[in-house]
Image (cartoon, helix red, strand yellow):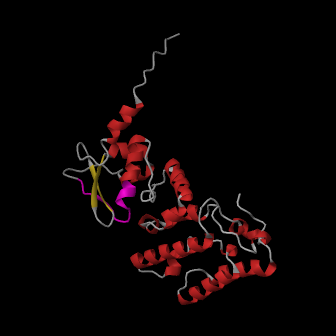
Amino acid sequence: MENPGLVVHGQTASFSTALRSLVNNPQYSDVCFVVGQERQEVFAHRCLLACRCTFFQRLLGTELGPGVPSPVVLSTVPAEAFLAVLEFLYTNSVKLHRHSVAVTFGLGPLQERCIAFIEAHSQEALRTRGFLELSAAALLPLLRSDKLCVDEVELVRAARSWARVGAAVLERPVAEVAAPVVRELRLALLAPAELSALEEQNLQEPFIPVEQIVEAWKCHALRRGDAARGALCRRRRGTLPREHHPFLDLPFK
């Protein structure tokens, strides 16, 4: 039987440090990104991005032609968040900050860690520019989370601010921008006075479908959670207690 040979492992720390030195390093770089509203140039290496992430594999999949390739423009991606993604791709590790958790490009493990970070630092994260620049697809798993350490009133307020920013950028109505995510707001958790105030504000600036507010009032009228709504009646980790919550029968898990 042939000897399988000896597997030699080098120092992981030095390997990671060497690769980290290539992040945003123009030396040997063969692709340049223009990132964020500030149009910051970020340098990278096509082969490494393509082999680590299917998003970049598709984005950079075309063959290089003669001459210097044109920069790849990602104007809606915050530069700090993009650099954090690159660091993760190059080194398989990254230190997350509240400003750098906005973009994951479909990287499952990184997305999970970003969501966990936001869950633990919810109030801080909701006030950042990065939150306002999230895509609807990135915002959905956050609004579905039971572990957000924030009360629903503040979450509704943050979601409205997010939709306003998107409406201004896309030149579309706030309600239209909010439509893909607003159903995940748990209006049944609000007290009657809070729900009335939200309903009044919604008349001035449409944001939440009227039928969604009606469903929340139904929970108050029947003094029970609507089983069909499931998690939308369940308290989050940061939900403040209210008099009607025991009737919802769906505590935080």
Residue 76 is covered by the magenta coloring: yes
Q: Hey, which quadrant is residue 82 in on the image?
A: bottom left
Residue 90 x %, y %: 38, 43
Q: Which residue is drawn at 33% across and 63% down?
A: 36
Q: In this view, does 170 lie above or below 138?
A: below
Name which residue lies at 43% across and 24% down. Answer: 9
Q: Nearer the viewer, residue 17 or 244?
A: 244
Q: Image height check: is 217 above or below 43?
A: below
Image quadrant holding the C terminus, namely bottom right
Q: Is residue 40 above or below residue 215?
A: above
The answer to whether residue 118 is magenta is no
Residue located 64% across and 84% down the image: 210
Tell me which segment is drawn in magenta. 69-82
Residue at (35, 51) in percent of width and height: 60
Q: Where is residue 23 in the image (x, y as percent from the top left)?
A: 32, 46
Find residue 192 and report its image quarter: bottom right
View extreme (left): residue: 67
Q: In this view, does 164 lie above or below 30?
A: below
Residue 207: x and y in percent read 55, 81
